[in-house]
Amino acid sequence: MAFTSQRPGEPTPPISDAHRGPTGVLEVPQRFLMGPGPANAEPRILNAQSLPLLGHMHPPFLKIMDEVQQGLRYLFQTDSKYTLCASGTGHSGMEMAIANLLEPGEKILVGNNGIWGTRVADMAGRFGAEVVELKTEAGTSFSLDTLTAAVEKEKPAVLFLCQGESSTGVHQTLAGVGDLCRKHNVLLLVDTVCSLGGVPLYADAWKVDAIYSGSQKCLSAPPGAAPLMLNDRALEKVRARKTKVRSYYFDLNLVGDYWGWFNSRSYHHTGMTSMWYAMREALAIVAEQGLESMWERHEAAHKQLWEGLSALGLQPFVEKPEDRLVTVNTIKVPEGIDWAAVSKNAMDKFNVEIAGGLGPTAGKIWRVGLMGYNAKPANVELVLAAFKDGLRQQGWELAAN
Amino acid sequence: MAFTSQRPGEPTPPISDAHRGPTGVLEVPQRFLMGPGPANAEPRILNAQSLPLLGHMHPPFLKIMDEVQQGLRYLFQTDSKYTLCASGTGHSGMEMAIANLLEPGEKILVGNNGIWGTRVADMAGRFGAEVVELKTEAGTSFSLDTLTAAVEKEKPAVLFLCQGESSTGVHQTLAGVGDLCRKHNVLLLVDTVCSLGGVPLYADAWKVDAIYSGSQKCLSAPPGAAPLMLNDRALEKVRARKTKVRSYYFDLNLVGDYWGWFNSRSYHHTGMTSMWYAMREALAIVAEQGLESMWERHEAAHKQLWEGLSALGLQPFVEKPEDRLVTVNTIKVPEGIDWAAVSKNAMDKFNVEIAGGLGPTAGKIWRVGLMGYNAKPANVELVLAAFKDGLRQQGWELAAN
């Protein structure tokens, strides 16, 4: 071989076909993703991903970024200018928030009642923060009294809470937490990956300083973009840092500039064209449906699910009704039942994903996600049919029917 | 409002419609992306992104990940088991490589002849590495003699080179560099974002230890996945680290496990479903076309472009023919010509993107990308027509015609 693009002295042996492949057009099976996420995407959102690409600095693309920012303001219920999507999955939003809000040596108080607190603690430690974990039993949330005592004792720079803990199905109330944090000059950071769009959230009214989320849950988009919001207090902290953010990719002083937060609009990285088309479309659907209607729809699916599960004799893992998350539902595996066989049967026979536990709940529960495009009556009925069939196969005596 | 999902004590004021929007189905204009990237995507690849989602741990999805890894082995011309895509744009591959290959205090020698060396130096500094920059004039590459002297003097842990410097249009030869690095126990890290698939690269034969790239250039996929490869030497370094990788999101000890590099295949983050469908499809197209055919096609487009540009009286920015990159072509702006007006006319009249310079070349050059789906005769003709028209408007006396 001889190419113009071959440099003198570079050997160009015959090309190895040892790993040549794959070939043919990709086909994928249809699945009902009723686990903790990703949920199925809206077809309209998937279609947006097949639109032709634009350049990452072209005016029509910058307009799409503006629309994403606007849609996020509505979704977060904030007037803050500082919204964007991190170019990665939900974890990238988490890492972006941690990397920017904390300087090395600063303290973060991590509410840890499942796997997300554990992960935030790990990340914050990697970025050089002092990490104090506040733990509570899996399946429970933190009371305002507990949080108040911990904040007063630890005097952290940042308090982390997870609104929807998907490993346990717990909904953490934020009532009073914003005021607590303002009083003690603490920044309040909240994970809303599996709750945003499914349950009430008012960033400004609740005084939440920073929030990140994911695209693939209640927003019905594919995984790959992490919605993020800072208010003025949080942004001020980032702008006044004494040390550079350790990650270039996640440095909000730079990424924010690409999104138009500051004076210029300069190139930082190449925006994720198709993924941001998807986010724009997901947020258009949110705006068209309205938050109230979305919250009601998620609540209705949750009620329908539990009416059916109760009739089958199944019990919620989360004891207190006010701790139960409507978007990710956790169900106790009854004594003597092989949870994995029920999940396998659901997938094999119904193409339905019913997940098991994770972290502290592994082997103890099933998890059923009712999120976004999947939070609707037909999907709930399918899940119930799969449970009924799977339990019957194991001789479970159904409470009703 | 009253919701089951409303927690006691959480205020739920009326939802603000102040930022409600956007609405309607997204439409985007058709553009010919003939700048340094992203390039236009293959329609077949865009179509793959509208396939229904799978779960990130579902066997059919893991099979797609396996196919991506296989396709990358062929593309990188390596037998290494350690290939994957970082969940982000090209910059995420850069950050992943830097974060994993260097421990705090270790030295990296950065070949800096444009903006990518500058960026690697910035990133490596943030991760606590000792950074030594080796610079050369914009538009030139590093000779093996220069590299040898620098490696012998600095004794770095890692040497960074950029195969295709998109800000200047320089193709850095790797001839002899792998042997140099082996001799001095240095890891060789190469950026191939705008060159991979367009020009020869043989990871194993050339003894390149670590490579990252981007999806949106010669692979004709959207931006959002960063192909990455480590060989055994590089992996050994990562496995034997004394300190945790500072980034959780990019820690290859964890991400690699999700991709099946080690014993288990455990959850690290939610894979980017649609984007990895796109990568699988892009790599299928690579395997179907074959690398030799791809390299020839890119070379042919480059030759066609320069025949046309020469006829218009335009000159290459890169002096030495053996330093010229075929995928991103840099063209001197002649004395008295308003480069921005030519670019604007190309976009307004022909829907063609012709980029200006960046960093050291801003205002001095145009940049024309001939990559992937765009490296074909019709696109080259369109670019030439746009140049001809734009130059004529400014009274440029054409050398021919």
Image (cartoon, coloured by chain):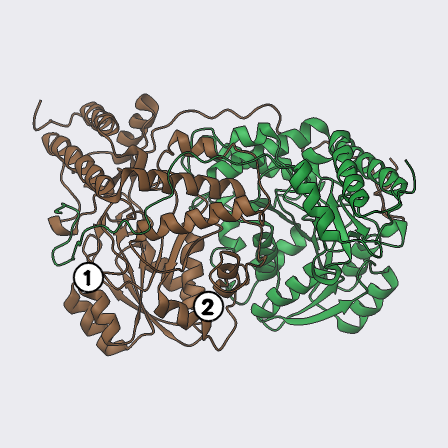
Chain colours: A green, B brown
- In the image, A388 versus B131, the foreground residue is A388
Return the residue found at the far right. A400
Name the residue rendered at 16%, 57% in the picture. A10
Query: Horizontal and vertical percent for residue B245?
Result: 50, 68
For the N terminus of chain B, the image quarter is top right
Disc 1 versus disc 2: distance between alpha carbons? 26 Å
Say which residue label 1 marks. B142
For the C terminus of chain B, the image quarter is top left
Q: Is residue A74 visible?
A: no
- Residue A52 is left or right of residue B321, and the answer is right
N-terminal-most mark, 1 or 2: 2
Q: Is residue A180 visible?
A: yes
- In the image, B41 versus A168, the foreground residue is A168
Task: Using a 10 Å C-alpha cutoff, classify the residue at mark 1 as few (fewer than 14 neighbours), some (14 to 19) or many (20 or more).
Answer: many
- Residue A325 is left or right of residue B311, and the answer is right
Check disc 2 and report its element: helix, strand or loop.
loop
Say which residue label 2 marks. B127
Query: Horizontal and vertical percent for residue A298?
Result: 77, 37
Q: Quadrant of residue A76?
A: top right
Give above or below for A379 relative to B98: above
Query: Horizontal and vertical percent for residue A15?
Result: 22, 50
